[in-house]
Amino acid sequence: MEDKWKEYSKSLEKSREYHKRYHLAVSNPLRRKILKLISEGKKEGEIRDELNLSERELEFHLKFLEHGFCIERDGDNIQLTKEGEIIFYVDDTK
């Protein structure tokens, strides 16, 4: 993804935008579940099946995560970014 923290650290306004996008991406419990499944190496079809999502619904959330700096996609390959690794530090069992 072309949007990296480096680009957003140049001004206070850009930094706010970066944090806003990141917060919106990770504040949704379903998107955190998607991040967890990606961290386990699941592919899009497996994620859809496990979460009972349509292709359109999953794509909406994946775009949100990508826009929020949490994942990078290259074709069918989805990887967590450093920001996406927040999932390792969040307890969703509550």
Image (cartoon, rainbow, N blue to C red):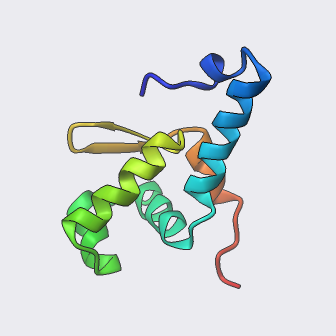
Tell me the residue at 64%/35% (across/down). Answer: 18
15 horizontally vs 81: left or right: right
Quarter occupied by the N terminus: top left
Residue extending farthest bottom = 94
Quarter occupied by the C terminus: bottom right
Relative to 83, say whether 94 is above or below.
below
> Residue 80: image x %, image y %?
48, 44
Tell me the residue at 73%/26% (across/down). Answer: 13
> Residue 48: image x %, image y %?
27, 71
Residue extending farthest right = 12
> Residue 72: image x %, image y %?
40, 37
Q: Foreground: 75 or 6?
A: 6
Tell me the residue at 69%/41% (across/down). Answer: 19
Residue extending farthest top = 10
Relative to 80, say whether 59 is above or below.
below
Displayed quadrant of residue 47: bottom left
Residue extending farthest front = 13
> Residue 58: image x %, image y %?
31, 63
